[in-house]
Amino acid sequence: MLDCLLFFPPLTKKEAVGGKAVNDKYGHLPPLGMAYLAASLLEKGFTVDVIEPLVLGLSEEDVFRRIAEEKPRVVGLNALTPTFAKSVSMAQAVREQFPHITTIVGGTHPTLSYRGAVKGPAAGILDEHSWFDFACIGEGELTIIELMNFFKKYDYDRGQILDHVREVDSISGIVYREYGSEGRGIFTGERPFVDLDILPVPARHLLPMERYVPFPVQYRRLPVVHMFVSRGCPWKCTFCCTPYTWGAEVRFRSPQKVVEEIKQVMRDFGAKEISFWDDTFTANPKWLTELCDLIVTEKLDIIWSCFGRANDMTPALAAKMKEGGCWEIFFGIESVNQESLNVIKKGLSPAITRRAAKVCHETGIEMRGLFMLGLPMETPEKAEKTVDFAIELDLDYAQFTMTTPHKGTDLYTAAKQYGMMIDEDSSRNTQNEAVFIPTGYKDAFELNNTVKRAYRRFYFRPSYWWKKIKSIRSFQDFNRYYQGIKIALAMVNYKMENWKSDISEDVQATLRSH
Ligand code: B12
Ligand code: SF4
């Protein structure tokens, strides 16, 4: 018997990134949210396990076999917008096969549906999806403990739990159903954001850590361990979920706690490199400077990469980051077209990004640019200018994804003003499929071709390859580049050739009709 079993019902790799051609060995990341929840539960004495269907390639049947074996009293499911339909169907199957198990759903999608710009169709998450008994809105570490204590009081008996459900009124941050298993969802109100330093280190030991190998060009030394040590973002880009899910103020774990966690993952998992997946790792230069100083003082043999904002990149900060072990920064550049940047409230200009690129090049930190094609106010010609910009910036890597207005974001609310949503099926919100066509484009095919051309133009340049060849220092470098390029080409090719046959008849009809 297990108190709680957590899992993240994923899209398959094929659904998420066109994975048929993608080597299954690479590109996995741990579901750290599940590991954070598990650590909090373990700390309070609950028994807990995490199933990782994505990385272990488990089918739904495998998951249900594990549930039957582990006999959890509670199942907690994570839901992103594109994976929400999966969470619903998994929760339904849990209810049908194991009616005594209490189910909770949490994650970006439920949170957005309650906190988002407009309470979208998913706002009444429990009204519409009776397979979930409870939904967790926002951070889950403290909420799940309080819920589990309530369940424990009734010996995890689902019948008793639902009979006494009004008692959870005192637990903030959840939705419960008014009359137990029927009735409307009631939100108990916002829970204040948590001080990250009180949270235990994620329970990575419950995850298959050896399987989390990034794509070959995204690391330098293995093993890489992923970390997420801050929450929130002071910016308000209209396409982004972060300000809603994590708040407008960015909170960091203290540098001391981060260093403790780095030491722990070096000791327990042999980490040689850290991949920080925080949304804006550079948002607080004072914190980052302290962290880098501490890594140096503690003489940690570790290198790392992170996400940054171009506005934050001063020469002094970049030098400090380099000294602390940073070798690569991912920047959300999105576009060179100022009108598009203004519509999405990116708070950037091409000049700011040029300055950041200069700083990175001079400091010797690799720069990866993330771009959104098909933005409001964009045309295929303007998209070409964005690709010119990526080339001009002399980026080490560039990624071009399709603009995806997620339900609950401001961009979703404004989408119709700037173009057409051609697919409201949120399971297609993978950022690799055309769901929104700006007015400047003829149709989805044109947008798709623009992305394809962007990759071709950026990567099929002799000067780019010459630079890469010159930077090879070891066989490992060579192999990483070789594998990376093979995967990138296969992915681009796969997506471009097969996306059409992958989309539903309904959507194809819409595409044909405009
Ligand atoms: C790392 C990451 C991944 C990893 C791991 C995913 C995971 N589930 O953890 C990987 C690479 C697998 C991934 C893939 C994708 N991702 Co992703 N990912 C992230 C990223 C950068 C960090 C996630 C994270 O670790 N957060 C930190 C932890 C602590 O937070 P958390 O997981 O949300 O969990 C907390 C709460 O939400 C809550 N909670 C969550 N689940 C539950 C469950 C219960 C029962 C309870 C009580 C509470 C609870 O408690 C947790 C602790 O506080 C986020 C951006 C972000 N800032 O969150 C995007 C993000 C979640 N990803 C996103 C997307 C779109 C995707 C992909 C579709 C992209 C793609 N095309 O590949 C795929 C889909 C995955 C799949 N194959 O099914 C979007 C989701 C947007 C949305 N509206 O849902 C985000 C928000 C980024 C964005 N673009 O805005 N992703
Ligand atoms: S800066 Fe990044 S994390 Fe912050 S709102 Fe914009 S896209 Fe989201």
Image: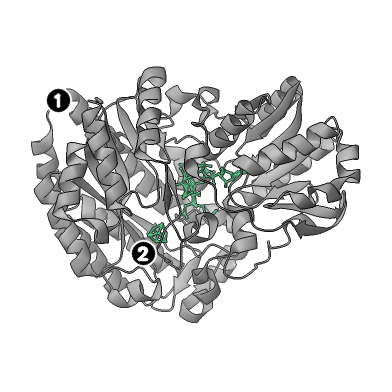
User: What amino acid type should be assigned to the residue bearing mark 2?
Assistant: Leu
Residue 421 location, quadrant:
bottom right
Q: Can residue 463 be seen in this view?
A: no
Query: Badge 2 is on which residue?
Result: 373
Q: Name the residue under label 1.
A: 474
- The quarter of the rendering in which ligand 2 is drawn is bottom left
In terms of image quadrants, where is residue 480?
A: top left
Circle 2 SS class: strand
Against 79, residue 486 (above or below) is: above
Res 171 seen here:
yes
Q: Which of 196 and 348 is in front in this view?
A: 196
The residue that appears at 47% across and 54% down in the rendered structure is: 499
**Residue occupying the point 35% across, 22% down:** 266
Viewer-proximal residue among 340 and 434: 340
User: Is 140 on the left or on the right of 320, as rendered?
Assistant: right
* Residue 9 against residue 361 in the figure, above or below: above
Q: Which secondary structure lies at badge 1?
A: loop
- Which comes sooner in the sequence, label 1 or label 2? 2
In the rendered view, would you say 244 is above or below 131?
Answer: below
Within 10 Å of the Cα at label 1, are there few (<14), some (14-19), or many (20+) other Cα atoms?
few
Q: Which of 268 and 109 is in front in this view?
A: 268
Residue that appears at 69% across and 58% down: 189
Residue type, numbered disc 1: Ser
Would residue 358 be found to the left or right of residue 250 on screen?
A: left
Classify 344 as above or below 162: below
Question: Where's residue 478, x and y in %?
Answer: 18, 30
